[in-house]
Image (cartoon, grey):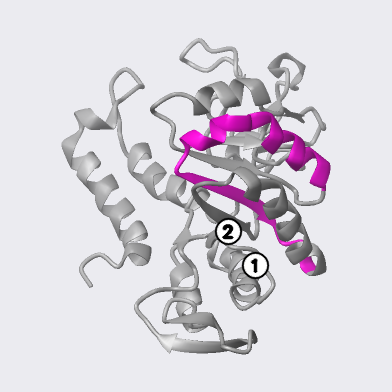
Amino acid sequence: MISVNDDEDLHFRKAEFDPNDCPLDCSRPCENICPAHAILNLGAASGDKGGVVAERCYGCGRCLPVCPYDKIKAITYIRDITATAKLLERDDVDAIEIHTSGRQDASFRDLWNGLGDSIDNVRLVAVSFPDLRDSTISAMNAMYSAMKANLRCFNLWQLDGRPMSGDIGRGATREAISFASYLATARDRPKGFLQLAGGTNAHTVEGLKKRRLFQTKTMFDESYDGSEHLHSVSSSHALISGVAFGGYARKVVGRVLSSLRPEDGRAAIENYPDHLVEALTESLALVGSVKCYGK
């Protein structure tokens, strides 16, 4: 899967600052708050000049408000449509995730139309968007209208409840669950699976089950007179088809990685079998809450 955006998006930005502008006596709250350990101390032992490691930064933005000198800025970028289309033509890419605000119908259509026939090469199109309240359903229908003419694969709506916050705490998942609860029973939403994201953590599935989103499936049947009837049936299937774990999964694996103490300061977890097994066990426990492993 590759991820793209149709306009400015929190998932497509990087923190940036010049470490030479930082006062020497700064307590560096940015370094302490970064969940990805993407901010290095100026004059680190590794010889790095410090600052933001772009490859690690995923745009959570937590460093922006804590800088006491307002030195940090966010740099946003938009994926090139032509380059994206070429990637989709490769035989090792079978899915695309489109991040959108849902508020700019024109930018979404421009991206989709720009991808052209390259969409025929994927098996899944996922559209990730935030809760737009009363405008959510109309935005979904507008996006689906843009896609449906040449959509020949599965499509999935990724509900971004509280972006990049799953590692903060238990309550971060509430917004995603509320968003999912609303859409799961909305009769006029377009076709497509529903997947949670944004604030998802170890408590997400538990919260979904409490709202019966993992026990029942709401179905619409069309009767002979053309009218539709809503009913629920007991089923092993779920109204919610998936959960995307981002920040929380990173936190789970990060705990294991941080326990490594290689002599040269760098390590590949594959070279530490015990740590690798621990990381896999933790990861499977998290994913297993959705996949129901062993049940």
Residue 81 as seen in the image, left or right of residue 118:
right
Which residue extends farthest front?
224
**Secondary structure of the residue carrying numbered label 1:** helix
Q: Which residue is mark 1?
A: 175
The quadrant of the image that shows the C terminus is: bottom left
Q: Residue at x 58, y 31 (%)?
A: 117
Residue type highlighted by circle 2: Gly
Q: CA distance from mark 1 to mark 2?
A: 7 Å
Q: Residue furthest top?
A: 47
What crowding class fits label 1: few (fewer than 14 Cα within 10 Å), some (14-19), or many (20 or more)?
many
Rendered residue at 54%/25% (across/down):
55
Residue 9, how many percent across, how many down? 72, 40
| Residue 117 magenta | yes
What stretch of residues is rendered in magenta?
104-133
Q: Which residue is mark 2?
A: 199
Asked if residue 216 is positioned above or below residue 83 in the image, the reply reads below
Foreground residue among 45 and 35: 35
State the SS at label 2: loop
Residue 95, image x, y percentages? 48, 40
Q: Earlier in the sequence, mark 1 or mark 2?
A: 1
Q: Is residue 115 visible from the viewing direction of this image?
A: yes
Q: Label 1 is placed on what type of residue? A: Glu
Residue visible at 20% across and 68% down in the picture: 294
Question: Quick one: 46 or 108, which is closer to the camera?
Answer: 108
> Marks 1 and 2: CB-CB under 8 Å?
yes
Residue 64 at x, y percent in the picture: 74, 38
Q: Residues within 10 Å of mark 2 (few under 14, many from 20)?
A: many
The residue located at (52%, 80%) in the rendering is 219
Vertical position of residue 160 compared to residue 174: above or below = above
Mark sitting on residue 56: none
